[in-house]
Image: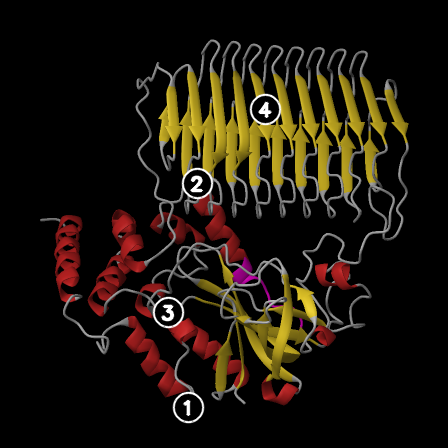
Amino acid sequence: MDRERANTIFLFLLLSCCSVYSNVITKENPFTAKASAIRYWNAHISTKIPLSPFLLSKASPLSSVESAFFAKLAAERGLSAHLAAFCAAADLFCLLESKAPAVGENHRNDADFAHYNNKQFSNYGDADQFKNYSDGVNFATGSFSRYSRGSTGHREGFASYADDGNVATSNFTSYGGAATGGAGDFKTYMPRVNVPDLRFASYDADANGHKLTFSSYVDDTNSGSQGFTSYAKNGNHAPVGFSSYGDTSNVVGSTFTGYGELANSANDTFKAYTTNANNPTNTFKKYGAGGNGGTDSFSSYRDSANAGADSFQSYGRDSSSGKTNFLNYGKSFNVGTDVFKEYGKGALDQSVGFKIYGANTTFKDYAKKGVTFAGYTKPEPNKGADGEAKPSKNGVEEGKFFRESMLQKGKVMRMPNIRDWMPKRSFLPRPILSKLPISSLDDLKRTFNSGENSTMEHVLANAQAECVRAPSPGETKSCVASIEDMIDFAVSVLGADLVVRTTEAVEGSGREVMIGEVKGVNRGRVTKSVSCHQSLYPCLLYYCHSVPKVKVYEVDILEVESKARINHGTAICHLDTSTWSPRHSAFLALGPGPGQIEVCHWIFENDMTWTISD
């Protein structure tokens, strides 16, 4: 019997007997990760306060036997073969790819998908409706392969797709390829999703008159990424409309490569695209290059956004009779950057109009003929797209940062949304962590079955980059994935007389609240703390760093009208901001600049701060 088969049989027996054993063990079972964490706390922390239930709840659910088994698999590089069982038992965030549909699989009839999630769709039929797809689901994944390819009069509707999901991933490959007529409608697609990752490859390529509409697309999302590759390439009269695309999103990145290239009479409309978004980044490469009679319209594009950067490279190059109109383009209240390179170069009868477009724009090697500029806006401090003075918040969520003077009983202030949008995960036991060092990206990719350019590869790479980067001047930092590691780091910075605090709940988020009783930690004196913030990673991972010269407060949060207590918050005030960037969002919200004011904020859900005990 080979090793892998033996491990599989042992795993089955292990999980079966553990299931039975769990029914008879008591809460005092000394072999659990929670019991181990309590012992570690008692041995290393001199404070007589018990280990916080908040922190203890994040301990690994694995028993000592399970932990030893998976540690053995990790040492033998065999975890990937048992990834599903490992992720389920250890309470991890994993993206388990399902088997791709067979090439010959076809679905010719109309289809209506309601309340579906995590499916693969291949060669589907004539009129399909996806309604409330993956609504409220965590890690929604949809794969549409050769969908609507070669169809005639096929209409697809995606309504309320992946609503409120976390880490939603969709892949549209050869979608609408060579289709004739029909229409695709993406309405309220992935709103309020955390880390959406969408890829449209060869989308609508060679299509004839296939109309696509993106309405309220990835609205209010966090850190979204969309890629449109060879989109509508060689298409014939394929109109595309983007309406309210990425509205009020945070750091949306869209890439259009080979979009409408060599297309005939393409008609694209970008309306209210990334409006009010925070630092959106859009790249148009070879967009409409070599096209014939294409019409593109950018209306209220990136209007009132915070910063943002757009790059148009070889846009409309060598095209014939192309017409492009930019209206209210890039009217960001915080100056963004736009680069137009080889724009309309070599084009025949190209007509491009820029009307009331934003500041800080570079036009490099663009067509001198047929391009008009009107109403160029020079930078003006504290002015928005409407020309009126903007409040000092400058697009930063109201209440996210505030002054220390607001922490007084009876004050009314707006509380930001402190809800944790990360997927629920647990720490891992140290014996397993030692076999999965975050510094080894290739090993992590192999363990978690992460393909090239996959969502999980991006998750792993981003976490690694954050953890291995050098600390800032005066900063002490560490990434921790176990309670024991977090305790060790906090003790190394602050000593053994410690207490950990967080905000109790999320009540009051996004609305006006009243400040109740306020208690200053260490009697309100200036102190030092260790703050820990979550990073997206398969197991629970915190980025912890030392924070000098702070004041920490415990605050009762009250309902404004009834004055009833609805939450108990922890707030931290940074007294020395002299090394912060002048572009830090705290200064956009509060004004002045580095070293001129203190900056306070709440500790968000599932984040925490460590201080010397009172």
Q: CA distance from mark 4 to mark 1?
A: 61 Å
Magenta segment: 466-476
Q: Which mark is residue 135?
A: 2
Question: Please, what secondary structure does the residue beneath circle 3 have?
Answer: loop
Residues at discs 3 and 2 in contact (Cβ within 8 Å): no
Label annotation for residue 48: 1
Q: In terms of secondary structure, where does tag 4 sit?
A: strand
Disc 2/disc 4 C-alpha distance (Å): 21 Å
Q: Amino acid at mark 4?
A: Thr
Nearer mark to the viewer, of 2 and 4: 2
**Number of callouts:** 4
Tell me which numbered mark, 1 or 3, is placed earlier along the sequence: 1
Residue flagged by tag 2: what amino acid is it?
Answer: Asp
Q: Is residue 199 left or right of residue 145?
A: right
Q: Horizontal and vertical percent for residue 590?
A: 77, 64
Badge 4: residue crowd in 10 Å (few <14, some 14–19, many ≥20)? some
Quarter occupied by the C terminus: bottom right
Residue 15 is tagged as: none
Q: Position of residue 565 (x, y in %)?
A: 54, 72
Residue 579 percent coordinates (x, y): 73, 70
> In which image quadrant can residue 537 be found?
bottom left
The nearer-to-camera label among 1 and 2 is 2
Q: Earlier in the sequence, mark 4 or mark 1?
A: 1
Q: Is residue 500 above or below residue 442?
A: below
CA gap, disc 3 and disc 2: 27 Å
- Which of the numbered marks, if any, corresponds to residue 213? 4
Dot 1 amino acid type: Lys
Circle 3 packing at 10 Å, graded few (<14), some (14-19), many (20+), is: few
